[in-house]
Amino acid sequence: MFGAGNVISILMFASPIKTFKHVVKKKSTENFKGLPYITTLLSTSLWSFYGVLKPGGLLVLTVNGAGAVLHIIFVSLFLVYAPKNVKVKSIKLVGIVDVFFLGVVIAVTLLAFREGMRITVVGILCAALTFGMYAAPLSVMRTVIKTKSVKYMPFWLTFFQFLNGGVWSTYALLIKDFYIGVSDFRVLC
């Protein structure tokens, strides 16, 4: 089951490849939004840190580490091909969210909390921010309604997010990890 979970997670993280092939081919982000990729980068980075802190967290670390690498690539491509005004806003958001906020979380967690409390603090943050990762693709709903096209709402991302939530919820139940469970169980509701 865990092998299948790894595959499903990687497929979810890799699902924007088709979108970014289109972006590179057109040399434009068109109406695609950067928010889903920026929030997923933060989420995968924080979950990777959680995997480092948690004893036996290698699975969480490796899967999310791979997701973080993929989303660094996606965010970079988005920034290269975004129109100037979108690029400036997106660079600010990446700087604030994916660099500054992540750095502060890591520094404060390591410097201000004892070992056991670190997992709790980072687990709560991860669970809360995973909601953002799953909700961010919904930011394109206005574009979908305006254009009457689902072109900008990637089906495979939505599909694999649902499967991923189910697999990680099962994993969380098996290993009794509240933070993984609470962040992924709500996908099934």
Image: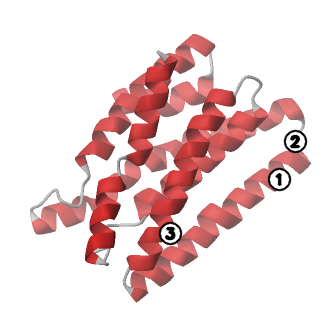
Mark 3 surroundings: few (<14), some (14-19) or many (≥20) residues within 10 A = some
Q: Amino acid at mark 1?
A: Val
Query: Residue 141 appears in which quarter of the rendering?
Result: bottom left
* Left or right of residue 33, residue 119 in this image: right
| Residue nearest the viewer, comparing 56 with 183 | 56
In the image, 114: left or right of 154? right
SS assignment at label 1: helix
Mark 1 and mark 2 residues within 8 Å of each other at the beta carbon: yes
What residue is shown at x 41% (from left), y 80% (from top)?
A: 86
Q: Position of residue 92 (x, y in %)?
A: 56, 77
The alpha-carbon separation of the residues under discs 1 and 3 comes to 27 Å
Mark 2 or mark 3: which comes first in sequence?
3
From the image, tell me which residue sits under label 1: 108
Q: Amino acid at mark 3?
A: Ser
Q: Residue tagged by mark 3? A: 76
Mark number for residue 113? Answer: 2
- Inter-mark Cα distance, 1 to 2: 7 Å
Q: Is residue 143 left or right of residue 105?
A: left
Q: Residue furthest bottom?
A: 84
- x and y, in percent, of residue 16 in the image: 35, 53
